[in-house]
Image (cartoon, rainbow, N blue to C red):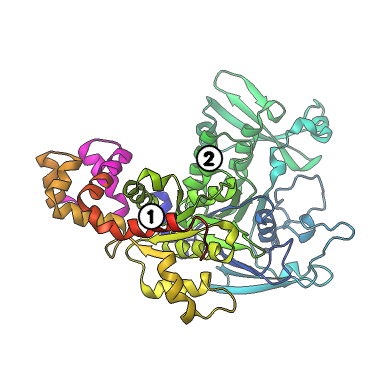
């Protein structure tokens, strides 16, 4: 079991003695985030969404949900205030200029698990003229890392005057060997050690310096932004008390894709060891791809209502962010396997006119159809779910995500559902359907690899605890890459069992042809 799977299993157990379960905004809300409930299903959560949709507001709000009575602790702040509290307050983030909405009447409810109470609780914050009663909030160490973390030290005279002066007494500590090894791997540099320098004159800033194996040393003043960001994050997160919550705005800032991928792997390790809860916002497909589906959230606002989509595919999230234009027809499927099957089934004349988007789950398939149905500007849409979508699930999700205000379910569902939704053959995920066909046809098996050993493997040996591993297992057995194995398997499926997909071909092809100038 990998660290991602282990974290998923431990999330709902006492291993994570503190966890934020959900937050909800009332109809007043904050900065336009209203009538919304957001749940957290995994120790690390990545939140994606377009600029201005409310990602930062949500992070800043979470920073204010908890209290910390340990006055020796200094949360991350880009300031030099000696009066800074050991916890965040609303005035740290929510400042109102003359004439701006002050969000009076806003109510924030949040559900959390606190080890001291040994149970889940719900707490509500209410704003009259101002927020108050910080000491009544649950105890938990909180750190918020905003975009200011990427500002170079040499742009601030306060830092230059203190740390560049030979007369200023400094205290120097070295990062632990474990943290230093993490920084070394991310930066891919021959680090000997990393020093963290502090001064009594500056309360909330430390000057980092790198010592290389060749004797060269340099500090924040001469580092690239990415180096400073990585050292700052690794050093602070590694020193947080167990069970803390860390919030990071735009985690990818200052980091190239390779560094992003390495950093997220190290963050998984820190979260696991320290039992932290980490929530970050991102516009990076590299970071989003690195997250398990339970840790992904997409925020959308097709009209005036903020939608929270859980377990979205990276493809769905970043088609939203890039604003790709829709074609004649958008077809939503659950995952990359379903997309590969559909692309192989369809002729090029149809493929050129449609957009196939995998969205991560059968619930999201229904949800996305509802978004198009409620907003005609998004274009024509159909969805093809896996074979295990039940009638009960479809009716429940249709009521929740598709049915318009004023419509009667019993009147519109029988008319609309056959136009909107179809399913792949079988009553399981496509991989399970494929395996059934492989075991039923030696000709199909030999189209993938014409060897007796492979035929015997499929007939007698292959056993999958997780159907998502089908292509990886086949790839290992025949000695090719996983993507090539998937191509061979899907091509053979369409060649030998294409007749079972005729309903899908008619469903998609017919609508791509008939809906050029029509709506539902």
From this view, report whether residue 245 is shown above or below residue 154: below
Query: In this view of the protein, which residue sits in the foreground, 217 or 26?
Result: 26
Where residue 65 appears, as percent x and y from the top left, is 68, 64
Left or right of residue 403, residue 208 in this image? right
In the picture, residue 87 is in which quadrant?
A: bottom right
Query: In this view of the protein, which residue sits in the foreground, 179 or 150?
Result: 150
In the rendered structure, does residue 150 fall within the stretch colored magenta?
no
In this figure, which residue is indicated by the disc labeled 2?
263
In the picture, residue 166 is in which quadrant?
A: top right
In the rendered structure, does residue 479 fall within the stretch colored magenta?
yes
Left or right of residue 333, residue 237 in this image? right
Q: Main secondary structure of the magenta part?
A: helix
| SS of the residue under disc 1 | helix
| SS of the residue under disc 2 | helix
Whether the residues at callouts 1 and 2 have beta carbons within 8 Å, the answer is no
Using a 10 Å C-alpha cutoff, classify the residue at mark 2 as few (fewer than 14 neighbours), some (14 to 19) or many (20 or more): many
Circle 1 or circle 2, nearest the eye: 1
Asked whether residue 473 is in view, the answer is no
In this figure, which residue is indicated by the disc labeled 1?
509
From this view, report whether residue 122 is shown above or below residue 335: below
Furthest residue in direction right, as rendered: 98
- Magenta region: 461-489
Q: Residue, x 44% and y 58% (percent of image)?
A: 514
Where residue 327 appears, as percent x and y from the top left, is 51, 49
Left or right of residue 137, residue 515 in this image? left
């Amino acid at each position: 079991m990998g660290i991602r799977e282990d974290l998923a299993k431990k999330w709902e157990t006492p291993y994570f003695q503190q966890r934020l379960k959900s937050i909800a905004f009332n109809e007043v809300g904050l900065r336009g985030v209203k009538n919304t409930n957001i749940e957290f299903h995994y120790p690390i959560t990545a939140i994606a969404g377009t600029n201005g949709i409310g990602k930062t507001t949500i992070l800043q709000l979470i920073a204010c949900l908890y209290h910390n009575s340990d006055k020796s602790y200094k949360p991350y702040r880009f300031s030099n205030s000696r009066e800074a509290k050991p916890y965040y307050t609303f005035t740290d983030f929510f400042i109102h200029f003359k004439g701006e909405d002050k969000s009076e009447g806003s109510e924030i409810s949040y559900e959390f698990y606190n080890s001291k109470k040994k149970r889940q609780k719900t707490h509500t914050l209410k704003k009259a003229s101002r927020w108050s009663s910080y000491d009544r909030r649950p105890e938990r160490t909180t750190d918020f890392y905003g975009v200011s973390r990427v500002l170079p030290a040499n742009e601030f005279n306060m830092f230059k005057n203190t740390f560049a002066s030979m007369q200023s007494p400094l205290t120097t500590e070295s990062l632990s060997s474990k943290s230093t090894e993490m920084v070394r791997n991310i930066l891919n540099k021959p680090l000997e050690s990393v020093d963290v320098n502090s001064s009594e004159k500056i309360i909330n800033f430390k000057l980092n310096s790198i010592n290389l194996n060749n004797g060269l040393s340099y500090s924040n003043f001469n580092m690239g932004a990415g180096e400073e960001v990585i050292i700052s994050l690794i050093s602070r997160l590694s020193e947080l008390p167990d069970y803390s919550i860390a919030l990071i705005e735009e985690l990818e800032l200052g980091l190239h894709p390779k560094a992003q991928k390495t950093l997220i792997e190290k963050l998984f390790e820190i979260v696991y060891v320290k039992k932290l809860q980490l929530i970050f916002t991102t516009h990076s497909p590299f970071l989003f791809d690195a997250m398990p589906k339970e840790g992904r959230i997409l925020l959308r606002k097709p009209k005036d209502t903020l939608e929270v989509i859980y377990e979205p595919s990276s493809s769905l999230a970043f088609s939203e962010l890039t604003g790709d234009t829709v074609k004649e027809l958008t077809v939503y499927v659950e995952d990359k396997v379903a997309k590969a099957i559909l692309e192989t089934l369809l002729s090029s004349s149809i493929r050129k006119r449609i957009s196939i988007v995998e969205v991560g789950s059968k619930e999201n398939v229904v949800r996305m159809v509802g978004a198009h149905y409620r907003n005609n500007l998004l274009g024509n849409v159909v969805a093809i779910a896996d074979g295990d979508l039940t009638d009960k699930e479809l009716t429940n999700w249709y009521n929740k995500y598709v049915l318009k205000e004023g419509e009667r379910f019993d009147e519109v569902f029988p008319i609309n559902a056959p136009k909107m939704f179809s399913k792949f053959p079988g009553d399981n995920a496509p991989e399970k359907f494929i395996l059934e066909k492989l075991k039923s046809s030696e000709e199909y098996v030999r189209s993938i690899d014409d060897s007796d050993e492979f035929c015997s493997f499929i007939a007698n040996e292959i056993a999958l605890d997780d159907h998502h591993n089908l292509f990886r297992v086949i790839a290992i057995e025949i000695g090719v890459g996983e993507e090539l194995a998937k191509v061979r398997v899907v091509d053979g499926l369409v060649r030998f069992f294409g007749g079972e997909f005729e309903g899908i071909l008619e469903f998609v092809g017919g609508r791509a042809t008939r809906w050029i100038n029509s709506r539902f």
